Image (cartoon, rainbow, N blue to C red):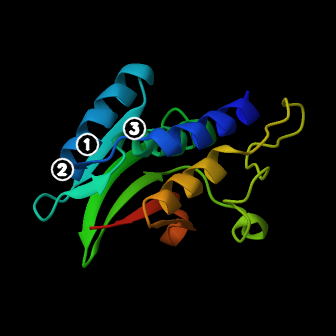
Amino acid sequence: RAMSEASRLEASISVAEWESIDPGQFVMRCVQAYRNVHEGRALRTEIQEGGAEVRCAPDLLAQALDKLVDNAVTLSGQDDEITVGVTREDAHWDLFVRNTGSRLPEDLQERLFDSLVSLRERPGEAPHLGLGLYIVRLIAEVHGGDVNAANLPDDAGVEFRISIPV
């Protein structure tokens, strides 16, 4: 399924429709959909209003956020909080997904966005192919941006951030 999804992404990149959007409104619409899908989970938004719109392929960015939110839901507990937001930094917008309750393993941080790397490998669970974060990286790169992940200070959780130039 994941390999098929990666192939579909490659095809969708070539035909993606590009437009200028308000990143704050985009995040608000996405989070409303996530609240419907993940009922009972604490999903918050942090929106920095104002500033320039961003030229992007909204369907691709939504797919990248979907992957990040899915990871946050899967790798955190029912009582943990997930925050999806957007900030403006100089010449780029940053879309981020932050969750409490989990940490990134130190040994995977350098390879996290490579193909076939998974955080979900636990004893007794079905294997996970680890293409989701690789797909996020491809989408960020198509937009001329990048993606990174970091553990938050004081073991507060994890944050994934996609930077897109204005």
Q: Residue furthest front?
A: 15
Taking 25 as reference, is 65 left or right?
A: right
Along the line of sight, which residue is nearer the eye, 145 or 42?
145
Q: Which residue is rendered at x = 32% and y = 47% of the image?
A: 18
Residue pointed to by mark 1: 26
In this rendering, the answer to whether 90 lies above or below 104 is below
Give the mark nearest the N terminus, 1 or 3.
1
* Residue type at numbered disc 2: Asp
The CA distance from mark 3 to mark 2 is 14 Å
The CA distance from mark 2 to mark 1 is 6 Å
Q: Residue furthest left?
A: 50
Residue pointed to by mark 2: 22
Q: Is residue 55 visible?
A: yes
Q: Which residue is rendered at x = 44% and y = 66% of the image?
A: 144
Give the mark nearest the N terminus, 3 or 2.
2
The residue tagged with tag 1: helix, strand or loop?
helix
**Residue 43 picture location, percent across and down:** 36, 37
Residue pointed to by mark 3: 59
Q: Nearer the viewer, mark 3 or mark 2?
A: 3
Residue 127: give its label: none
Whether pointer 2 and pointer 1 mark residues with C-beta atoms closer than 8 Å, the reply is: yes
Taking 89 as reference, is 97 left or right?
A: right
Taking 85 as reference, is 71 left or right?
A: right
The CA distance from mark 1 to mark 3 is 10 Å
**Residue 74 picture location, percent across and down:** 61, 36
Q: Which residue is rendered at x = 58% and y = 55% of the image?
A: 138
* Residue type at numbered disc 1: Phe
